């Protein structure tokens, strides 16, 4: 179980991590990480913690919202994931991010229109990122099954956000 967190600036640029570690080494991903299940950590608390750990930005719970949920079967042939997606509800200023580099990688502001051009996982490029763009301000739930090549996916729930 994990979270992915989408932080946008006022110019519709997304804060992405160019990863130095697995999973997805050398690829780009949003800020995120695994829930501390042994601690009973909630997805919201995990999102707040991961944002602060990876960007230095301390947010209140009223500054983010769950925008999606992804279940993924057999990612990279082995791992099953349940991922909660969060968006920060206000533009994030570049000056609010004190350090753009840490042990897991380098943070970069990327124009939203260019995200799909980066080295991101195929599931993100074909399914997750288009749904995130479509559902900003709304909510969606999807299931991705990676047991077959090509993978299959299903939109299970879709509310609000942008039409299309």
Image (spheres, helix red, strand yellow):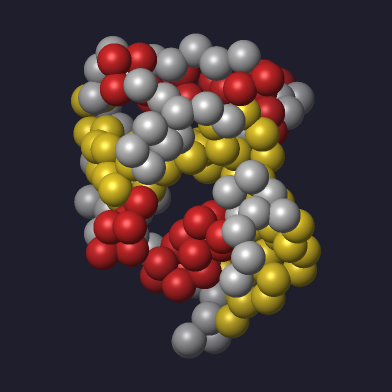
- Observer-nearest residue: 18 or 88? 88
- Observer-nearest residue: 130 or 26? 130
- Observer-nearest residue: 118 or 54? 118
Looking at the rendering, which quadrant does residue 35 occupy?
Answer: top right
Q: Is residue 86 above or below residue 159?
A: above
Which residue is painted at 45% across and 34% down in the image?
7
Specify the quadrant that holds the N terminus.
top right
Residue 137 in view, yes or no: yes
Looking at the rendering, which quadrant does residue 103 occupy?
Answer: top left
Residue 79 in view, yes or no: no
In the rendered image, residue 59, in percent from the top left (x then y), is placed at 55, 16
Specify the quadrant that holds the C terminus.
bottom right
Which residue is painted at 53% across and 42% down in the image?
4
In the rendered image, residue 20, in percent from the top left (x then y), is placed at 24, 41
- Observer-nearest residue: 135 or 146? 135
Q: Is residue 31 above or below residue 152?
A: above
In the rendered image, residue 58, in percent from the top left (x then y), is placed at 49, 12
In the rendered image, residue 156, in percent from the top left (x then y), is placed at 76, 68
């Amino acid at each position: 179980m994990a979270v992915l967190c989408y932080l946008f600036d006022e110019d519709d640029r997304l804060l992405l991590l160019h990863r130095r570690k697995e999973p997805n080494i050398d690829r780009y991903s949003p800020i995120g990480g695994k829930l501390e299940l042994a601690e009973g950590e909630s997805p919201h608390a995990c999102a707040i913690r991961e944002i602060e750990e990876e960007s230095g930005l301390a947010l209140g719970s009223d500054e983010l919202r769950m925008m999606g949920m992804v279940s993924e079967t057999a990612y990279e042939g082995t791992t099953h994931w349940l991922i909660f997606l969060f968006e920060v509800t206000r533009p994030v200023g570049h000056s609010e991010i004190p350090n753009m580099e840490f042990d897991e990688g380098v943070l970069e502001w990327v124009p939203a229109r260019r995200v799909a051009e980066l080295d991101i996982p195929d599931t993100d490029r074909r399914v997750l990122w288009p749904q995130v763009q479509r559902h900003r301000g709304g909510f969606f739930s999807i299931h991705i099954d990676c047991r077959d090549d090509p993978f299959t996916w299903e939109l299970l729930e879709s509310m609000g956000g942008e039409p299309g």
